[in-house]
Image (cartoon, grey):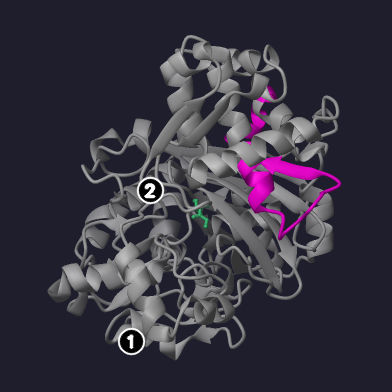
Amino acid sequence: MSLYLGLDSSTQSLSACLISTDTGELAAELSVNFGTDLPHYDSPNGFLPNDDDSVRHSNPLMWVEALDLLLSRMRDQGVPLDQVQAISGSGQQHGSVYLKAPVSGGWDASQDLKPQIACLLSRQTAPIWMDSATSTQCAEIAAAVGGNEYLSKTTGSPAIERFTGPQIRRFAQLEPEAYTQTGRIHLVSSFLASVLAGQDAAIDYGDGAGMNLMNLASQDWDPACLAATADGLDEKLPALGASSSVIGCIDSYFCQRYGFSASTQVSLWSGDNPNSLIGMGAAAPGTVVVSLGTSDTLFAAMDTPRTDPSGYGHVFGNPAGGYMSLLCFSNGSLAREVVANECGVDWAQFAAAIAATPAGNHGNLLIPYFVPETTPRVTESRVERIGSEAFVSGADKAAYIRAVVEAQAISMRCYSSWITSQPDAIRVTGGASANRGITQVLADVFGAPLQRLTIGNSAALGAAMRAANSAGHNWQQLVATFSTVDPDFQVTPSGEHSAVYAELTAKLLAATRS
Ligand code: XUL
């Protein structure tokens, strides 16, 4: 049987998606949740507690232990891992892992991975994409290369707090000795690829573009960006490579422990958004995707790198070739969860509250930044209710629930106009795309119907499809087989609401600026 495995190491979980190119079916789907399955890492939402709101780190050993746990569950459930031909993966973007030296593998199958990786770390924690503590470093890097215009043109984005370059600079400044002792800096994606392959993996162009370090045109590290970031950085970074490259065969640890065949290939991993672009069947320009996860993102493929004039959006590499545009909204599910918890409702009641309130919410508006936001840039959390007395006092819970979802959708539409002015349809993915209330608001605000695919985890699916592609299967066939639109998912705009939302958009923009 020809099976291909995609792994997705996201903020809150590690998931697997196993596809069969023989039957065209999803052969297995499994997940490990960091908060509930690995509570000893004290990371209920996938990151460590910190008194400083702007600092967000995770323990990289949690990701490694999750890998052992997920694979042992697959083995124990009788998943035929011996028939997996190739594996690829997806990692939350921008996060960085600091090692004393490049990975050389040869893991000992008589003990878990965790202690074997623990002794390789030169820094115990990994800053992740939610970290926004690097404004100073962003300004310094931009100044050193002659301005953000250079960075945008060369790397696809201005200096961005969560991007890896500014994070590396902060580490080098705060812990110079530990930085000196660091021989290799990986992204989450290339770190886990290295663990699986038992050798140092390259960073793919898709994820590499989220570092403020990669020159999009030459597809190599940009010397000016390296010099502006930290001393000796060129020796600490792995090579860059095409997303379809094969690293080599899986480390024998995984064969002995979990029954993989010694010939199983491991291909480069990529970021979760580039993988999702593939899984959603959106690798060719023209299809807009909205992912409603821990962060909300909006993205689409593009042939040539076109940067966001307002400076919020990014250009990443498209794993199928070319580029993709992306906007990231940090206040995704975490913000919706805060509102649901404050109102004491479950997700069905959350959707019912939205159904019971009208589009435009009688003009009630929420400034919805429960955590610092990247689009637009809001450096400190800010939540404010503007509108009726019942809304402002918190008595009108339904209006509060609609307000957070409307503010998020309005913001998404407003800041994505450089990518798409009026999409014909939007493909949705991510946990919250199962919520009818949230998706209805999205359709109403964009004035466009939504589509969802039959396979839910688009990042893990995209990784599995990439594994199959690097083993010789063509994109067209893979997309036609696996990225199929769910015919039972019907969400269309509930009416014509453009005037109502134009008014709320103006109000939100004015209030955010004030
Ligand atoms: C994208 C971004 C987030 C993470 C979430 O730029 O920061 O979407 O990739 O995992």
Residue ID at (30%, 67%): 136
Q: Quadrant of residue 274?
A: bottom right
Q: Which residue is mark 2?
A: 68
Q: Earlier in the sequence, mark 2 or mark 1?
A: 2
Q: Relative to 48, is 257 above or below?
A: below
Q: Are marks 2 and 1 in contact (CB under 8 Å)?
A: no
Tell me, yes or no, whether the highlighted magenta stretch contains residue 430.
yes
Left or right of 373 in this view: 21:
right
Q: Position of residue 378 (x, y in %)?
A: 43, 49
Tell me, yes or no, whether the highlighted magenta stretch contains residue 111.
no
Q: Secondary structure at mark 1?
A: helix
Left or right of 176 in this view: 443:
right
Residue range of the region highlighted in magenta in the rendering: 409-437
Q: Amino acid at mark 1?
A: Glu
Q: Nearer the viewer, residue 374 or 36?
A: 374
Q: Which residue is mark 1?
A: 235
Q: Quadrant of residue 403?
A: top right
Residue ID at (44%, 85%): 146
Residue ID at (25%, 40%): 49
Query: Can you tell which mark lies on residue 266?
Result: none
Q: Residues within 10 Å of mark 2 (few under 14, many from 20)?
A: some
Specify whether residue 3 is in view. Answer: no
